[in-house]
Structure formats: C-alpha cells, structure tokens
C-alpha cells in the first residue's frame, strides 16, 4: 500500500504530459500569486524602505562575510528547524507540516516526471510518509494549536479566509492519502485531491502560502539589525551592575536598591504558551 506509486496506473487514463503540464501550471500559479501578493501588500517596498530606515540607526557596518554567516544561521535555525517558534508544540507541528509538504511535493514531481519503471519503491513510500506527516502536523495545528482555538477559545470548526492555506493543505494531503489507499485511478477522490491542490497553489494571493518565502527574508533582516547595533531603536540589554550604566541612570537605586537584580527579558517571564 505504502510502496505503490498511485500515479503509475493513472497514465492509462490521463496522458503523462497532461500531468506534467498541471505541475508546471501550479508552479506558475505560485510564482504569479507571490508576485501579486507582494505588489498588493507592498511588502517588498515596505521591506526595503524599513531596511534603509534601520540602516540609519546602525552603529557599525556588517560586512559580506558576516552576512553570509547570518544567512547560514537563518537557514539552519529559522528555515530548516522552525527555530522562530518558542512553543515546542507549535515548533514540532510546524516541522511536521513543513517537511511533510516538502517531501510530498518533491516526490509527486519525481513520480510524474520520471518513467514509472525507473522509480524505486522508496519514492512512493516517502510520498505517503510526507502526506502523513503533513496531515499529523496540520490536524494537530487545526484542532489544538491554532491561536483561535488555543488562546481565543473559538470552536475548531469556525474558519475564515485566513485559514485557506492550512485547510487546502489538509484537504490535499487527506484526499491524496484516501485516494491512494483506496486503489487510485480516476474517481471522485482523485477529483477532490486535484481540486484541493489547485486551491492550495492557485490561492497563494489570498492565503498565507507566501510566508514561506517572506519569513526567511524577515528573519535575516531582524538579525542584521541586531548585528549592526541598530536594534530597531530599542534600548540595549543593560547590565545594571556596570558602573557606566549606573552613572547613566543614577535614579535606578531609588527604585531597585543598591544591588539591582538582573530581571532578564520581561517577555521570558511567562512560558511561551500562546504563539
Ligand atoms: C513548505 C513550507 C512551509 C509550510 C507548509 C508551512 C506551514 C505553515 C502553517 C500551516 C502555518 C500556520 C499558518 C496559520 O496561522 O494559519 C505556518 C506558520 C508559520 N510559519 Fe510556516 N510553513 C512553511 C515554511 C516556513 C518557513 C520556511 C518559515 C520560516 C523561515 C516559516 C515560518 C513560519 C512562522 C514564523 C509561522 C507563524 C506565523 C504567524 O503566526 O504569523 N514557515 N507555517
């Protein structure tokens, strides 16, 4: 069941070139949707204007070697391991959803673009595992982790346009799995699978799909701002025992005594449990 390629028999009813054409159209839809999204929200314009503004408060310049190191660290921490999530459940759910989606999409493309005879049974196995990972991470997110449900107390069945991304992801994985486990072929399950994946890739303009391209750029920029000392004009993390800091803020002992304790970051005072 896990090792059978559900697209192999399909070529008897649907010419392979049509399936390949569908994938190319989906790639073009994602590109078009992302570009339209950037134009509509002016996100690229905001990003570059904000970067230019932030540069004005820079205390030092960040050279290209340091930028490469920052980009590598963003790739390893924020992109590959979802390190932006402080809440371990949200992080694990995102890891399952993200890696499941990537494995599912890549193996779909391999099965459709390579001749069936050349495909090892590993590829369809990974296709099923990817869809399952996406379903587990996604349903966990939908029923228990989503802010609307976990923090706002709204029922799991309430949805709005912002949920288009997660719902179309879940529908694609669910119908793909049921379609494959019931023997594949051209039937209503196949139609639902294709319909949901078309909504997923065709709905980029209206959904959160493009965050996967924007978030890495934003994470990189955030780190550069910290490295160049600009800190978005936020005050530095003062060490209150430093005589220099005590001279700068002579009234601190009035509020906190002669040996002020290090209170740490306020945001860390409570365990991250919402976002
Ligand atoms: C195949 C790739 C990816 C998939 C399928 C995916 C999936 C998701 C899903 C389903 C959500 C929840 C959206 C919602 O609130 O409805 C989400 C949120 C998020 N993702 Fe991803 N993601 C991917 C790639 C990435 C990458 C590359 C990054 C960062 C570098 C990233 C960072 C985030 C962050 C920070 C959030 C929280 C967003 C917020 O609450 O504003 N994701 N992602």
Image (cartoon, rainbow, N blue to C red):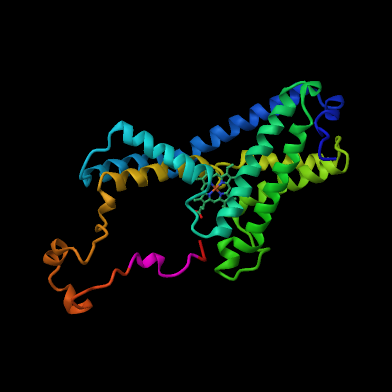
Please state if 129 lies on the left or on the right of 73 as rendered. right
Give the quadrant of residue 256: bottom left
Between residues 265 and 34, which one lies in front from this camera angle? Answer: 265
Q: Residue at x 58, y 35 (%)?
A: 30
Q: Is residue 159 above or below residue 114?
A: below
Residue 193 x %, y %: 76, 41
Q: Quadrant of the N terminus?
A: top right
Residue 192 x %, y %: 77, 43
Residue 216 x %, y %: 46, 42
Magenta stretch, main secondary structure, is loop
Q: Is residue 227 above or below residue 86?
A: above
**Segment tinted magenta in the rendering:** 264-272
Q: Residue at x 36, y 47 (%)?
A: 222
Q: Residue at x 63, y 38 (%)?
A: 102
Residue 198 x %, y %: 68, 39
Q: Is residue 68 above or below residue 135?
A: above
Between residues 53 and 5, which one lies in front from this camera angle? Answer: 5
Please state if 50 lies on the left or on the right of 91 as rendered. left
Q: Residue at x 29, y 68 (%)?
A: 262
């Amino acid at each position: 069941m896990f090792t059978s390629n559900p697209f192999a028999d399909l070529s008897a009813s649907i010419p392979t070139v049509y399936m390949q054409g569908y994938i190319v159209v989906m790639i073009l839809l994602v590109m078009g949707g992302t570009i339209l999204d950037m134009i509509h929200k002016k996100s690229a314009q905001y990003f570059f204007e904000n970067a230019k503004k932030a540069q004005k408060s820079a205390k030092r310049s960040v050279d290209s070697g340091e930028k490469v190191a920052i980009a590598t660290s963003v790739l390893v921490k924020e992109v590959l391991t979802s390190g932006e999530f402080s809440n371990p459940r949200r992080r694990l759910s995102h890891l399952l959803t993200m890696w499941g989606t990537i494995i599912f999409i890549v193996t779909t493309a391999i099965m459709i673009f390579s001749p069936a005879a050349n495909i090892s049974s590993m590829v369809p196995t990974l296709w099923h595992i990817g869809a399952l990972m996406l379903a587990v991470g996604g349903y966990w997110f939908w029923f228990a982790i989503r802010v609307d449900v976990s923090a706002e107390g709204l029922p799991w069945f309430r949805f709005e346009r912002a949920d288009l991304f997660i719902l179309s992801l879940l529908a694609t994985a669910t119908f793909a799995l049921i379609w494959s486990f019931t023997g594949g072929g051209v039937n209503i399950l196949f139609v639902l699978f294709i319909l949901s994946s078309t909504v997923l890739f065709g709905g980029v303009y209206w959904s959160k799909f493009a965050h996967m391209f924007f978030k890495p750029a934003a994470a990189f920029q955030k780190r550069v701002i910290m490295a160049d000392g600009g800190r978005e004009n936020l005050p530095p993390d003062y060490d209150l025992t430093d005589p220099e800091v005590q001279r700068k803020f002579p009234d601190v002992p009035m509020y906190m005594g002669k040996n002020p304790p290090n209170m740490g970051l306020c945001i860390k005072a409570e365990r991250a449990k919402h976002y």
